[in-house]
Image (cartoon, rainbow, N blue to C red):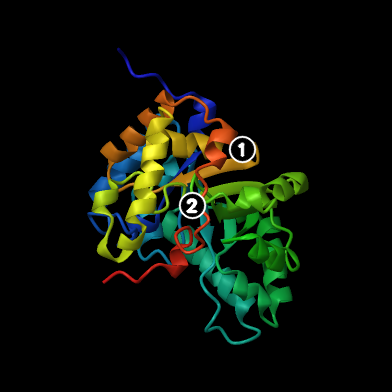
Amino acid sequence: MAEPDLDPATAARLGLGGAQFGLDYGVTNPVGRVPQDQIERIFTRAVEAGMGWIDTAPEYGESEKAIGLAGLASSSLRVVTKTASLSRTPEGGAAAQIQAGVAESLRRLRRGQLDVLMIHHVSDLLRADAGDIVAVLRDLKASGKVGRIGISIYDKPEFETAAAKLAPDVVQLPMSLLDQRPIMSGLLDELGRRGIAVHVRSVFLQGLLIADPAAVPLGMARWRDALAAFRAAVLAKGWEAEGACLRFVLARPEVEAVIVGVTGSTQLDALVASLARTPSVDPSDAAALASEDPVLVDPRQWPRRD
């Protein structure tokens, strides 16, 4: 029997995560930084599948350069990148650093415009020159160098901190079948009411939700039982883990894009095929899978990799 096709509207809401294109990123990543030739194959398959987005950042090593070399400029993919950390920038220098950073991102990506520019670190908006940051972001948008302005957050308190300084067009946040905090906290509903587009990352929790629990890295061993129970519950509902994780997030109308990280074109094909085969995920069934462990769902609190 032929594999079902993924409908174009759903495919257009999928995006490639660029972290592993420039870094050895992800606790279940077996290959480290993805080689350039494989990035180009991934890129080709993403475009052929009708995916709509690619997400990167200056802090992802050589990711922006690799994406530019892969042919972003001639593709239909919309690009999201972020500001570099301002933690070492002298007060009064933030605006100039952001302007220079955008120019450098455009050069590396080989693009004339960034579809979305996000503040990568909410703490940067707590600086004394935060007003200058907001002003330069507005200027970049008005000039056409940036299409929309966004913020990358972890949770509702971070959104509230950022929103007190900046009215974003887009918010990027983590959400998954295991990490349903944006729903339970009311944040997703609030973003919808405000008309703010949502981009979701960590839909597979760095691969933990779709990996064999027995293969979980040693530093994550304390969660093997919880992850095994999650996988068993997903399978008991007749779902494929990959497709169910994606369908759960895509069911929310507030979500404009879901970012997925892959290390090869075959893996990307498998994710797209699983999504196409997976029917809708019932919200009441999904709610039972949410974790109450705040450390498991927050990679910032995980043990450091050796």
Say whether disc 2 or disc 1 marks the residue closer to the N-terminus. Answer: 2
Task: Name the disc covering residue 252, or none.
Answer: 1
Identify the secondary structure beneath mark 1: loop
As drawn, 252 above or below 277: below
Most extreme residue toward the top is 1
Q: Give coordinates of residue 58: x percent, y percent.
A: 45, 65
Residue 153, horizontal then vertical, whole percent: 58, 61
Q: Residue at x 25, y 46 (%)?
A: 38
The residue indicated by pointer 2 is 111
Residue 190 percent location from the top left of the image: 73, 50
Tell me how far mark 2 sits from mark 1, CA to CA. 31 Å
Asked whether disc 2 touches disc 1, contact meaning CB atoms under 8 Å apart, the reply is no
Q: Quadrant of the C terminus?
A: bottom left
Q: Nearer the viewer, residue 168 or 142?
A: 168
Q: Can see residue 122?
A: yes
- Tag 2 secondary structure: loop
Res. 23 visible in picture: no
Q: Amino acid at mark 1?
A: Arg
Q: In the visual, does 144 lie left or right of 72?
A: right
Give the residue at x 32% y 54%. Answer: 224
Task: Give the residue type that dot 2 points to.
Answer: Arg
Image-based side of 287 in relation to 271, left or right: right
